[in-house]
Amino acid sequence: MKKLKAPLTLHQWLLASALFSCGLLAARMIVTQTIEYIFLPWNLFLAFVPYGITRWMSAHAEVVENKTRRVVLLAVWLLFIPNSFYIITDLFHLIHVRSAPKWFDLLLIFSFAWNGILSGFISLRRVEGITGGDRGPLLSILLVFFVMWLNALGIYIGRFLRFNSWDVLTDPVNLFTEIAGLVLNPLDNGYAWGMTVTYAVFLTLLYQMVKMTREIN
């Protein structure tokens, strides 16, 4: 089957989708005269940070050939990648906000969340390419699950413990104390680990299925 030429690149489609989400938010603010959900563009900006890192790395392969630079950049990427999936939990706000129709707010938040998820998937796919290696399919899936597990843990820490990526520098003691408590006392933190594991499995399945869409004829 002859492949159709896409009118836009994936990067351009992603930017168009982000602009659509911001347009929905602007329309909501004008109609309702409120600034509810004003935090969504900032969350999306943070979600795009790991995407920007891997896009830059892919465009400057000669720079990241240096192992030290590559490790540092990937460490920063790993620190920020949970932000790409965090917006999923902004759907919680649907329970409390009533100034606009629920269908509109559902579309609004989901569109921001989808942009974050897609940017995260693209950046993870690039990391798979950057790290290279002759990995088999099983090892590849296990590595993806490990990253998604870290993502899910980061989502829990951000949503319920109210830490963010910057706290690694600004409040490291409290952050790592909380993480140590979760790791050392798993039975006392069933809620946290239940969310972490189920989100990790879901994101892994979703990522693998999105990767396989290239096989659609």
Image: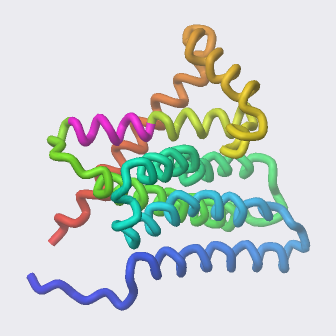
Is residue 30 shown above or below 181?
A: below
Identify which residue is drawn at 57% across, 63% down.
Answer: 48
Region of the chain picked out in magenta, as a range: 139-148
What residue lies at 22% left-to-right and 87% top-to-bottom?
Answer: 4
Task: Indicate yes or no whether the magenta region holds residue 153.
Answer: no
Q: Is residue 39 left or right of residue 111?
A: right
Question: Most extreme residue toward the right, as rendered?
Answer: 33
Rendered image quadrant of residue 149: top left
Residue 172 location in percent, x, y?
Answer: 72, 31
Q: How far across and how far down the image is residue 169, in percent? A: 72, 40
Identify which residue, 57 or 186, lies in the foreground.
57
Q: Where's residue 108, x and y in %?
A: 65, 66
145 in magenta: yes
Foreground: 131 or 185?
131
Q: Tally the numbered discs.
A: 0
Image position of 25 (left or right of 56) = right
- Depicted 167 relative to depicted 62: above or below: above
